[in-house]
Image (cartoon, helix red, strand yellow):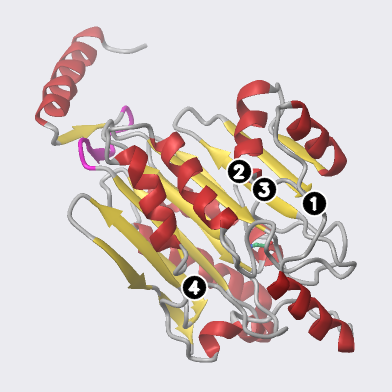
Amino acid sequence: MVNRRKFIQFSAFTGFASLLGKRAWSADGMETIKGKPIVISTWGSGLAANKGAWEVLGKGGRALDAVEKGVMVTELEDNCCVGLGANPDRDGFVTLDACIMDEFANCGSVAFLERIKHPISVARRVMEKTPHVMLVGSGAQQFAVAEGFPLEEQKLSPAAQKNYENWLKKSEYKPPAINIENKKDHGPFAPNKLESGEWNHDTIGMVAMDTNGNMSGSCTTSGAGFKMRGRLGDSPIIGAGLFVDNEVGACTATGQGEDVIRVAGSHSVVELMRQGLSPEAACKKVIERIIRIKGAKAKDIQVGFLALNKKGQHGAYAIHKGFSYAIKTNDMEKMIVSKYMME
Ligand code: GLY
């Protein structure tokens, strides 16, 4: 039973602290910084996405609204791996996965969704308007249309068409390799755009804390380019591609989804933060776990985790060199290069 006197003391203190816009403690004793919104997101596309999120966070809005608005920017970009402009599956269709989670552990997800511009917003509707967490395929599309989302034309973007034609020359399916763009030395801040039909595969994952100290996260992707039809990665799976626990922190993942799912990646990172690890240390531990499981095959895959805790501390870790993330606060806006295990 809650000790009433302690509870009153605690409430009075946290109320006073939040008035000052400074430190407070959540129910399980985690320190949290109120009044200092922050948003972080994966890869170079995160810079523009964070700006979108800031339109909400900068006005004192809710983290949930921010993480939806933020990744919608990337969903509209012409890039290899997110939104309708992305690379298709082996059969030539773009199929999209997304999920979202708020400070109350409400969550929603869509997967294998076709012809809808903003899967992240459909995921939010699933969360808010259905008794379910996840809708897939034609059912997700049917729900989206019933909710008023327009059904877009089934047509590849010019870049995706070119990439697909290149891919068709060999039609060779192999698991997506590590992020080739960054290996090609376009630098860590390059947006996730392919110039050719080479393999590439990434996601935008975003986590944020608002002025009330509440956290939310979002994740959206077209998954692996030229994947088998029907393949899902980690991005629409709560606990794999994204996890938020408002008492502790939030994490999102990028890279080869199969290997993120295997270790319940984002959930594992949050649980390690609960045990007291910093965001970076928690991300590193789960990367080490993946490398242990994969053995020699780890050299061929990329996975990156990005995490934020209730103190506003952030950190990332990746298997390979090349992962970076974008951060925005009241005082700064920049890219940060992630640490990694292998060159
Ligand atoms: N991380 C995205 C995917 O594997 O689909």
Which mark's residue is nearer the viewer, 2 or 3?
3
The span picked out in magenta is: 27-36
- The three-letter code of the residue at mark 1 reads Glu
- Residue visible at 27% across and 49% down in the picture: 312
State which tag comes first along the sequence, 1 or 3.
3
Q: Nearer the viewer, mark 1 or mark 3?
A: 1
> Secondary structure beneath disc 1?
loop
Q: Position of residue 190 (x, y in %)?
A: 46, 77
Kindly identify which residue carries mark 1.
Answer: 153
Quarter of the image where the N terminus is located? top left
Residue underneath mark 2: 120
Report the Cα–Cα distance between label 1 and label 4: 25 Å
Judge whether residue 43 is colored magenta.
no
- Identify whether 262 is placed above or below 275: below
Judged from the image, the secondary structure of the residue bearing numbered disc 4 is loop
Q: Amino acid at mark 3?
A: Lys
Identify the residue position indicated by label 3 in the image: 117
Mark 1, residues whose alpha carbon is within 10 Å: few (<14), some, or many (≥20)? few
Q: Residues within 10 Å of mark 4 (few under 14, many from 20)?
A: some
